[in-house]
Amino acid sequence: MKRLFLTSSFKDVSGLLADFEGNLKGKTVTFIPTASIVEDVTFFVNAGKKALEKLGLAVDVLEISTAGSDEISTKLKSNDFIYVTGGNTFFLLQELKRTGADKTMIEEVNAGKLYIGESAGSIVVSPDIEYIKEMDEAQKAPRLTGFGGLNLVDFYTVPHYTNVPFKKTAHKIADTYSSTLNLLPISNHEAILVENGKVNKVSSKS
């Protein structure tokens, strides 16, 4: 049973995770900031980490691009949840595939481990990530040989749909691909919940 909690900006919807999961206190989360290390703006990494800790979670950082295979395998398998931050989706996918972390991650999520994604972390679980080229620079991943994503969901998240500085870009992606891909645009105050084969979009603004 796959369970995913996909967001644009985790700190803005973190309260929804407590409703979705229920039992968070004392649990451990593998925190993967890899997508952010090729970006200049990274404030969201710390914001996400603090939001997780505020919920009572123990954060175990795993930098995929520099970690060895044993560390990657151990952390992904032993911790209760997996959290992947925002940043550059192409670089993230490159490093997940290069290290084999993608295979372990897919196995764990398919076995029922909760996956929490933020922006790039929400995009990378799609069947393919080429659609996000308008938002992310593909050239930041020179060793990436294909755009096939983790394929954990059958839709394509478009994050930051109504939020600056990505508003125009997100709308352009929606206009370009809405007739060919199953797009799910979300704002910074929305999350996509995947559970029992059902997909629901929820908002943190009541």
Image (cartoon, helix red, strand yellow):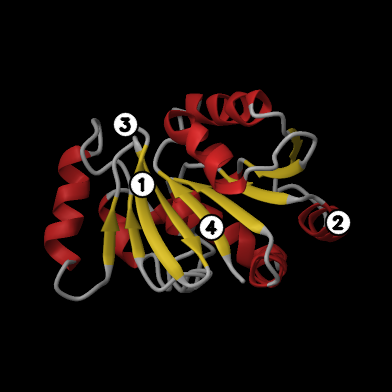
User: Which image quarter is the C terminus in?
Assistant: top left
Instruction: Specify the amino acid type for callout 1.
Output: Val
Q: Nearer the viewer, mark 4 or mark 1?
A: 1
Residue 100 is left or right of residue 121, and the answer is right
Would you place residue 1 above or below residue 134 in this image? Answer: below
Task: Give the numbered dot on residue 4.
Answer: 4
Q: Earlier in the sequence, mark 4 or mark 1?
A: 4
Residue drawn at the location 19% of the way across and 67% of the way down: 177
Distance of label 2 from label 3 (alpha carbons): 37 Å
Q: Secondary structure at mark 1?
A: strand
Distance of label 2 from label 4 (alpha carbons): 21 Å
Residue 57 is left or right of residue 42, and the answer is right
Q: Residues within 10 Å of mark 3 (few under 14, many from 20)?
A: few
Q: Which residue is mark 3?
A: 205
Q: Which residue is mark 1?
A: 202
Q: Earlier in the sequence, mark 2 or mark 1?
A: 2
Q: Residues within 10 Å of mark 1 (few under 14, many from 20)?
A: some
Instruction: Specify the amino acid type for callout 2.
Output: Thr
Residue 149 or 11: which is nearer the viewer? 11
Residue 161 is left or right of residue 142, and the answer is left
Q: Secondary structure at mark 3?
A: loop
Q: Which residue is mark 2?
A: 74
Distance of label 3 from label 1 (alpha carbons): 9 Å
Q: Secondary structure at mark 2?
A: helix
Q: Earlier in the sequence, mark 2 or mark 3?
A: 2
Q: Percent x, y for residue 203?
A: 34, 40
Q: Nearer the viewer, mark 2 or mark 1?
A: 1
